[in-house]
Every structure is written in structure tokens, then in C-alpha cells.
Amino acid sequence: MPRLPSGGCLRGLLALVRCARLSGGPRRASGGPGCVPDPPAEASLLRGELDRFGGVSVRLARLDRVDTVTFQRALQAAVQQWRSEGRVAAWLHIPILQSRFIAPAAALGFCFHHAESDSSTLALWLGDGPSRLPGYATHQVGVAGAVFDENTRKILVVQDRHKLKNMWKFPGGLSEPGEDIGDTAVREVFEETGVRTEFRSILSLRQQHGVPGAFGKSDMYVVCRLKPRSFSIDFCQRECLRCEWLDLTDLASTENATPVTSRVARLLLYGFRAGFDKIDLTTEELRAAYTGKLCKLYHRELPDSYKR
Amino acid sequence: MPRLPSGGCLRGLLALVRCARLSGGPRRASGGPGCVPDPPAEASLLRGELDRFGGVSVRLARLDRVDTVTFQRALQAAVQQWRSEGRVAAWLHIPILQSRFIAPAAALGFCFHHAESDSSTLALWLGDGPSRLPGYATHQVGVAGAVFDENTRKILVVQDRHKLKNMWKFPGGLSEPGEDIGDTAVREVFEETGVRTEFRSILSLRQQHGVPGAFGKSDMYVVCRLKPRSFSIDFCQRECLRCEWLDLTDLASTENATPVTSRVARLLLYGFRAGFDKIDLTTEELRAAYTGKLCKLYHRELPDSYKR
């Protein structure tokens, strides 16, 4: 780790650090001449914001005129300052084109927390004991649609183009950030098969770890019951090898279906005979306690006398 | 974007690019003297591996002697080469201490795909049409435990220390990567309350978007039914303000509980009176079709005659 410079230069660096003291509006640094340069961009270099968890968050604006050595020294002094102020964590939000500051921060102990598209976020735990930094997203969520036509007793299935074994499965795909589960099912079924549908219920939830193509993340896979609104198939040739309306009893008994597909086909067969209320999870919108936002809750049917 | 150099230097760069042609084992570049330097580290700079989706993946080993200008020119030539070979995507895996190469890659169109701890991954879509690059994890998964003692008809609830409103809720927390839902519930309940429990079933699934503290990601929240194995409370003072065994009927009727807690309390009350099979999702282990790994599937109870 680089050592702090001595003498006059230290004054300039401490001026930079003062900007990071979270004490309100922008300040101009006051380093002496010939020491740390003091253009407006640099003066705001390490200005941070305090979050409600006791951490400090610094957004690195455009720092075209700041070199990495100056940055690293300023960051080291800032970290010392934040520790002395009792901050528990430091966060750096770095635009991708300013990524030359990542390695100097890493040399001071910062690690990637996450990165996406055109920026990365680095974090350093400053509190006592082991890090209690919150994690980032850990799961991908896949959603499949079991589209069952009660009139013909047929169900919509596909075979993937790129698999070694050609097994029947339900059309589906990954939920996009911010997308409701039922909406993912309807969208993916249409994109893959050309069939329009309507969400009915959630039938099943599967969890799996170490899924190929998930970059080491875990996978949640939800199967929804959908009702068809159109019937003619126009399937995506890039993704699918075959797409058919198959007799539900055939799908429930064939060896040529994935285990989850086979199980859900049997669940549907039971639901068709005994009533879908036997297999469905109901959907309800509730208001979240703290954010006041609507959220969707899925569970077994609850008699009206128990609701409020 | 930087232009390709002309004359002799071009020869040296093309030598670097040849290493990225994915055509087998390591090759030595053969740039002329005084042009692009050719130490072993640099010769392997852009050697890539072809993935099964038609993309090329380059792991940037230690490139201590490669400057960013040389890297950017080599990368630009490599991208041209990959395009001409019909590759659909290029991936760069960059150790955090080599992050000086991120901005030059970004100037050529690469974006962050993800980053974690001590490395980042950048990607560039090379195929036709809009990007079909796979996404990264989009969700965090929270798990809560509804620990109900059938003998006393009491249920274990907590109040968060850091909330503005002190409302009763079930103890719980985020699922760790690779952790089963039931295991998260048991672990979090113990860490938060000191009570030991046993997983019984999944009761409810909630989805929510734009949750605070989720870094803009979506949130899945699973409530499990747990059976207590110990009863004395030793709660985490850092996280919780209060922790109590509350009468289930009181929790189902109080205004002082979050909406989801209140709803699940009513579901439990119904299950206690009518049978837990009315509210539970059963858990079963199945073998995944392609990976052969075990996965856990949750759905409504299916009569044995329907299983195989």
C-alpha cells in the first residue's frame, strides 16, 4: 500500500479528504501551490454521502484531470478519515470510462460489489468484525408456462434446439428485472411458440444450484398454469426444434419429457380431474409494509372468512 | 475509437490477434523487432476459448508489461478477426488489479456483464440484430420462517431494530448463493432468535420490485413453515428490537404486523384448524434433465397414484 506523503503534499491531500466528510454542499479544496492540483473536478473527487446503514458512498464524477496516484493517496486519507468517524462501509461508484481508478482502490482493500453495463461499484468494510456488507443479486428466475386447453385436453410443449437429448418441456425463459412472474410466462410462451395466453396460477417452484449458463448463480424456476387465447403455433426456429399440442395424458406418461415437466403434467392431470383449486397457488396483491408498494403474494387458496 | 496503426506495427498487432484465433494450443506471436513487444505474457494476451454458444472468451492473465494503448489496438484487431470468423459474442475476464484495461475495452464497445470480489467480466455482442447475451442474476431471494408451536399455539415473531414502524414479522434473511430455501429459513431463524427449528413446507411466495437495499434488483421472498425444536429466545440485539412467542390468533388479528405476516398468520390459523395439507407446498427432490443434478421441486400435494 502506498504511504501517505509528508509535508506540504499532505496538506493538499487532507484538503481533498475534507470534501469527503459528508458535511453538506460542495467545498473547494485548499492545497498549496505546486502540490495537489485543485481544479473543480478534483475538489469534488471524494465527496461522499452517508447512507442509513452508516456507510459512506462516493460517486466518482468525471475525473479527467486526476491521475491514479493522486486518487489513491486521496482515497487512502479518506478511508482513514471515515474510519475515525466510525463509518462502517465505503462504497465507490465508478463509471466504466474511469475504471483506471479500480486497481488503485483494490490495492487499498476495495473489492467489486457488482458491475453492470457502464459502471461498477466497489466496497470496503470498515466496521468491526467480519464484513456485514449486503450481497448482490444471487439468483436468476426462470418462468415456464404450462398452457392447457381444457376443450381438447392438449398441452403446449417444445423441444430445445440446442440440447443433446430432445425432451419435451414447457416453453419459458428468464424473468427480466422488474417483470412479474405471470407476465414472464405469457411473454416467453408467445415469443417461443406464437400462442397467446392468460395467466391462471403458479403451480410449482424449483430451486437448483450450479445451473449451466447462470455464471455460478442459483436458479429459481416457476411453472405457471396458463389458459390459451389462441391456438395456432408459429414457433421460434432459433430456439426450438419442435413445438406441438400434445395430449396431456401422453405427456404425463412419456419417458421423453424432463422430470419437472413430467411431474407438472401429472399435477395438471390431477387438477383437471379433481379441480384446479387442488393444485393452484392463488395470487393476491398486497401493499408492502415499509415501501407502500404493491407486491404479489402467492399461496394456497384461503377461505374468504379468513381474509381481511 | 483508436484507428489501427499502419505498416510494420500492424504486422505485430496481427501477430497478437493470431493468438486469439482459438485454433488450438498456445502460439508465439511473431511481430517484427522494434514494433509491438513480444514477451510471453503478451503473446498470450488475447488467446481465447470458444464457448458452446458461439462466443469467444478471453481470460486476461497477468499483463504487467502490456500498456493500455497496445492492449486496445490488439483488442480492436481481435474483435475484427472474431467478427470475420462469425463469433457472436466476446467476453473479457479481467482480474481487479488489471482493471486499467476496462476503459480501453469500453471505448471499443464492451460493457460490464458482471463483477464480483476480485474480477470483472466485460462483454460485446458481435452477432446480428439486438444483443442476445444472457443476463446475470436478477433477483435476491429472502426466506422467512413461520415457527409455530402447535402445543401452545404460539408463533415466533420479531420486530426489526432499524425500521421506522415497529411491526411484527417473521424472522428471516437473504438466501446465500447455493443454499436451499429450507436451510436458509432454519439458519436465519436461529441466527436472529436463537430458536432451533425443522423445515416443514413452503407456505408462500412473494415477488416485489425496487426493494430498498436490493441495488435495483427484484426480490423473491419465501415464507416457510417450521417446527420448533427449542423454545428459549436469545435474540440478536443488533438486528432485532423485540422477539416473542405470540399467540397465533393475536398475530392474525393485530394491526401491528406487516401485511404479508398478517396474511400468513391467517393461512397458518386455517391450516391448524383444517389440516396443514390445506396450506402446505410439498417438497420433492428430482433429478434435473440435463445436468443430472438433484433439484428441489415444491408444489401442492399430489396423490401417490399420480406419482412415478
Image (cartoon, coloured by chain):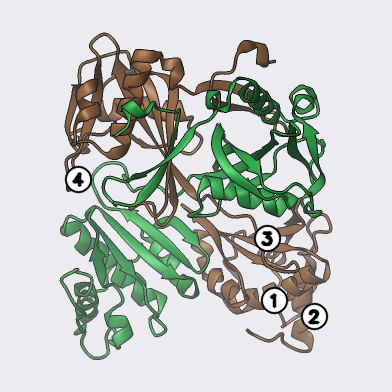
Chain colours: A green, B brown
Work out whether disc 1 and disc 3 sit on a shared chain.
Answer: yes
The amino acid type of the residue labelled 2 equals Arg
Disc on the earlier residue, 4 or 2: 2
Disc on the earlier residue, 4 or 1: 1
Work out whether disc 4 and disc 2 sit on a shared chain.
Answer: yes
* Chain letter of disc 3 in the image: B
Disc 4 and disc 3: Cα gap in Å? 41 Å
Q: Which mark is residue B132?
A: 3
The amino acid type of the residue labelled 3 equals Arg
Q: Which mark is residue B11?
A: 2
* Chain letter of disc 4 in the image: B
**Residue reaching furthest to the front:** A151
Disc 1 and disc 2: Cα gap in Å? 14 Å
Work out whether disc 1 and disc 2 sit on a shared chain.
Answer: yes
Q: Is residue B108 visible?
A: yes
Disc on the earlier residue, 4 or 3: 3
Disc 3 and disc 2: Cα gap in Å? 33 Å
Of badges 1 and 2, the one in the foreground is 1
Residue at 58 percent of width and 77 percent of height: B107
Disc 4 and disc 1: Cα gap in Å? 50 Å
| Residue contact at pointers 1 and 3, CB within 8 angstroms | no
Q: Position of residue A277 (x, y in %)?
A: 53, 26
Determine which residue is flagged by label 4. Answer: B162
The amino acid type of the residue labelled 4 equals His
* Chain letter of disc 1 in the image: B
Secondary structure of residue under mark 1: helix
Determine which residue is flagged by label 1. Answer: B76
Quadrant (top left/top right/bottom left/bottom right) for the C terminus of chain A: top left
Quadrant (top left/top right/bottom left/bottom right) for the N terminus of chain A: bottom left
Work out whether disc 4 and disc 3 sit on a shared chain.
Answer: yes
Q: Position of residue A131 (x, y in %)?
A: 32, 45
